[in-house]
Amino acid sequence: MTISEPIPLVERSVSDSPSALAPRRRSWLPQVSCTDNMMMGVALLAGPANVIMQLARPEVGYGVLESRVESGRVDLHPIKRARTTFTYLVVATQGTDEQQAAFREAVNSAHRQVRSTNDSPVKYNAFDRDLQLWVGACLYKGNVDIHRIFLGEMDDEHADRHYHNEGKAMATMLQVPEDMWPPDRAAFDRYWQEQLDKVHIDDAVRAYLEPIAASRLRGLTLPGPLQRANERLALLITTGFLPQRFRDEMRLPWDAQRQRRFDRLMRLLRGVNNLLPPFLRAFPFNVILWDLDRRIRTGRPLV
């Protein structure tokens, strides 16, 4: 990458100010107001990349890889696992106290079974606050990237409000106390850089993540050429949403040509997203709390 090329959005720190951007990069990044909906269906495109980021901490990776909670495994039940993650995001940031309490207990019940054994390569426990903080940080970082790509730059006031409200909520929904969340966006950037030193994806976790990166679903295979085309597109999107540190760990190739293809695709999708009526733009996040209440009323599992 030459010095004249813009820094990909996913590589930027969350404390970057819009005023620091060169005009060429600002031209397609409109300013937005604080009323913009942070939860959009298009954000699902970044889901596989965010899973990879979370599992890049070995303790999280092996906690998922060795999980005895069969019903929550993304490799076995990808749609159910996705619903749980989406519900977590919406409940943490928009749910009532009652909804949060019910969902927290359901997650805690599953997490009680997630702990390392004597045979595990690394020690882990799903109640580890440090690991929960890392997962919350990945969710927040991904949320910022989605906003920058599909809605544009937040001004500093909006970015600070989002950080202290939605960002903190994503990390502190379970056992992480609020004072563990970095006090501001600059502190978050320092935390993020420090945590990158702890990132490592070994062969076992990489093999687990590769089908997720390519959106390869168990039991669902398209005819040969369509399947290959779908996986190529999915890999482009997943890799494009990953900072280079994680691409390297996954051994996913990337270059300037792929970056341009990714940028063109995101511009196209942003245009389509902007044309959608608000209800469709927010789907499925806008029906998740309704579904959660229905599950609570009928006694169905929440996770």
Image (tube, rainbow, N blue to C red):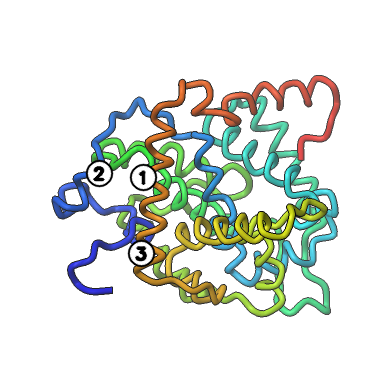
Of the numbered discs in the image, which one, if any, rests on residue 28?
2
Are there few (<14), some (14-19), or many (20+) residues within 10 Å of tag 2?
Answer: few
* Residue 128 appears in view: no
Tell whether label 2 touches label 1 (CB within 8 Å): yes
The tag on residue 190 is: 3
The residue located at (45%, 45%) in the rendering is 143
Image quarter hosting the C terminus: top right
Residue contact at pointers 3 and 1, CB within 8 angstroms: no
108 on left or right of 264: right
Alpha carbon distance from label 1 to label 2: 9 Å
Question: Left or right of 125: which side holds 152?
Answer: left
Say which amino acid is labelled 2. Answer: Trp
Q: Position of residue 152 (x, y in %)?
A: 31, 41
Q: Position of residue 261 (x, y in %)?
A: 40, 58
Residues 111 and 139: in front is: 139
Question: Which residue bears the numbered disc 1?
Answer: 267
Element class at badge 1? helix
Q: Residue at x 80, y 20 (%)?
A: 297
Please tell me which of labels 2 and 3 falls first in the chain: 2
Dot 2: element? loop
